[in-house]
């Protein structure tokens, strides 16, 4: 069953129609390879190139055989007359199935890579747009120091770029074919056939195979997507957290065409982060699939069938879920509302406490020992926390501070622009525009 979150292109990759088309491509490529070796006559090869697959015949044969590849070959051979005797010549089932599966994985990963690029572009636009917007950075959920909201988004951009490198490696690992016979010895089919088939299909021969392509390659595919899902959940979780009523610094698109316009059946005021919650939920599914993928690596001897039923679920589901999550998050990021004024209100919630590191460093630079400086700054900070004072006023009123730092120097320390000093450097390192800093 195709999940409700599936999208047409990825659904097509994992459809039975595409699977059978790929099986037919492998069979024709194998016949072509035998023809190049002089085994299949040229006139019969010409007929084999016209081979077609009948789903009706397949269903009839499968009802009797319960064997997918046998039913498949019997559903193809009538379309080429006497030349049908060469269909599946010298092959074992997994020569066809595993090679075709590799082609499916390549198709899937190429779609996913394209979606990652789309998300990166959306994040890039919003990062550059918000490079000059000051927000509070948080550690342990508590205010730390002010930062650029654009910088927060730039970290996402960089993380996605890293995932593209992993995706490229995974593509290389799964882009292999296997035409080596029942246990990988090439006893009934010479290596030249495998090399020709893989060349025709645009993939590489697996350096070594048993009855199947080793499953660490498929485990890498799922694990790579599980890591990508973890990052997508990280981004979605941040949006969800910042949309909380008490914070309300960003908000998912709401009421826009194609997006949620009703938050609750009983509370008309609700605008919930439903889309990012959906991404977080699907991330759990994808992460979970990485476990059976890893367990599929250890099979009995040259192959058992315990991996097959699992892969029929985890490979399509992982691909479909990631494809959907990427598209959904791209829309969220593109349409996300950013409340810059609210961000500054939140920066000011702690009444200047964010400047405590600057004051500490300045006192040390003035000649005060670190322990004394720390105790002075911490005392003012604790008073701010406990008595709702203003840290800046308390610091200015401290005799020990005023003896070491002038009023003009303190004014310099309490300047939010300081925290934006090197944001441009990071953006330039990522190849992002810093034009938005000019208005900061």
Image (tube, rainbow, N blue to C red):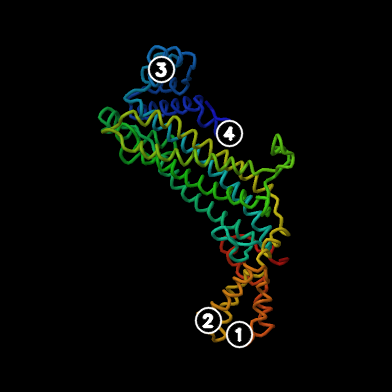
Residue at point 71%, 66% (across, down): 440
Local secondary structure at mark 1: helix
Q: Is residue 377 above or below residue 66?
A: below
Local secondary structure at mark 2: helix
Tag in front: 3 or 4: 4
> Which residue is under mark 4?
5
The mark that comes first in sequence, 1 or 3, is 3
Q: CA distance from mark 2 to mark 3?
A: 83 Å
> Which residue is under mark 3?
71
The mark that comes first in sequence, 4 or 1, is 4
> Which residue is under mark 1?
400
Q: Nearer the viewer, residue 318 or 395?
A: 395
Tag in front: 2 or 4: 2
Dots 1, 2 in contact, CB < 8 A: yes
Quick one: label 2, few (<14), some, or many (20+) residues within 10 Å? some
Q: CA distance from mark 4 to mark 1?
A: 63 Å
Please state if 191 lies on the left or on the right of 72 as rendered.
left
The mark that comes first in sequence, 2 or 4, is 4
> Which residue is under mark 2?
372
Which quadrant of the structure image shows residue 302? top left
Q: CA distance from mark 1 to mark 2?
A: 10 Å
Residue 226 at x, y = what percent?
A: 47, 43
């Amino acid at each position: 069953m195709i999940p409700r979150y599936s999208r047409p292109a990825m659904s097509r990759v994992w459809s039975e129609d595409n699977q059978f088309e790929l099986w037919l491509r492998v069979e024709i490529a194998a016949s072509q390879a035998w023809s190049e070796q002089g085994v299949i006559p040229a006139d019969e090869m010409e007929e084999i190139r016209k081979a077609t697959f009948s789903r009706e015949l397949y269903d009839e044969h499968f009802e009797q055989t319960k064997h997918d590849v046998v039913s498949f070959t019997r559903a193809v051979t009538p379309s080429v007359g006497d030349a049908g005797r060469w269909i599946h010549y010298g092959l074992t089932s997994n020569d066809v199935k595993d090679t075709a599966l590799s082609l499916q994985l390549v198709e899937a990963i190429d779609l996913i890579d394209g979606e990652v690029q789309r998300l990166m572009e959306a994040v890039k636009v919003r990062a550059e747009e918000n490079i000059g917007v000051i927000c509070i950075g948080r550690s342990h959920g508590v205010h730390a120091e002010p930062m650029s909201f654009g910088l927060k988004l730039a970290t996402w951009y960089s993380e996605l770029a890293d995932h593209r490198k992993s995706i490229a490696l995974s593509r290389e690992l799964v882009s292999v074919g296997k035409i080596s016979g029942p246990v990988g010895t090439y006893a009934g089919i010479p290596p030249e056939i495998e090399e020709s088939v893989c060349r025709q299909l645009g993939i590489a021969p697996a350096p070594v195979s048993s009855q199947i392509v080793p499953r660490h390659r498929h485990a890498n595919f799922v694990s790579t997507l599980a890591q990508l899902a973890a990052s997508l959940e990280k981004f979605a979780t941040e949006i969800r957290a910042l949309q909380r009523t008490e914070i309300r610094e960003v908000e998912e698109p709401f009421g826009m065409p194609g997006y949620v316009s009703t938050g609750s059946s009983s509370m008309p005021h609700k605008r919930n982060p439903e889309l990012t919650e959906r991404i977080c939920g699907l991330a759990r599914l994808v992460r979970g699939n990485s476990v059976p993928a890893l367990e599929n690596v250890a099979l009995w001897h040259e192959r058992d069938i315990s991996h097959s039923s699992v892969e029929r679920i985890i490979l399509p589901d992982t691909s479909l879920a990631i494809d959907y999550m990427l598209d959904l998050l791209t829309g969220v990021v593109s349409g996300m509302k950013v409340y810059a004024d609210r961000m500054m209100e939140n920066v000011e919630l702690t009444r200047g406490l964010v400047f405590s590191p600057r004051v500490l460093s300045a006192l040390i630079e003035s000649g005060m020992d670190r322990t004394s400086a720390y105790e002075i700054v911490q005392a003012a900070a604790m008073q701010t926390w406990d008595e709702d004072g203003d840290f800046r006023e308390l610091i200015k009123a401290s005799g020990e501070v005023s003896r070491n730092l002038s009023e003009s120097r303190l004014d310099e320390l309490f300047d939010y622009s300081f925290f934006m000093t090197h944001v441009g450097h990071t953006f330039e390192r990522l190849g992002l525009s810093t034009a938005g800093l000019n208005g900061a």
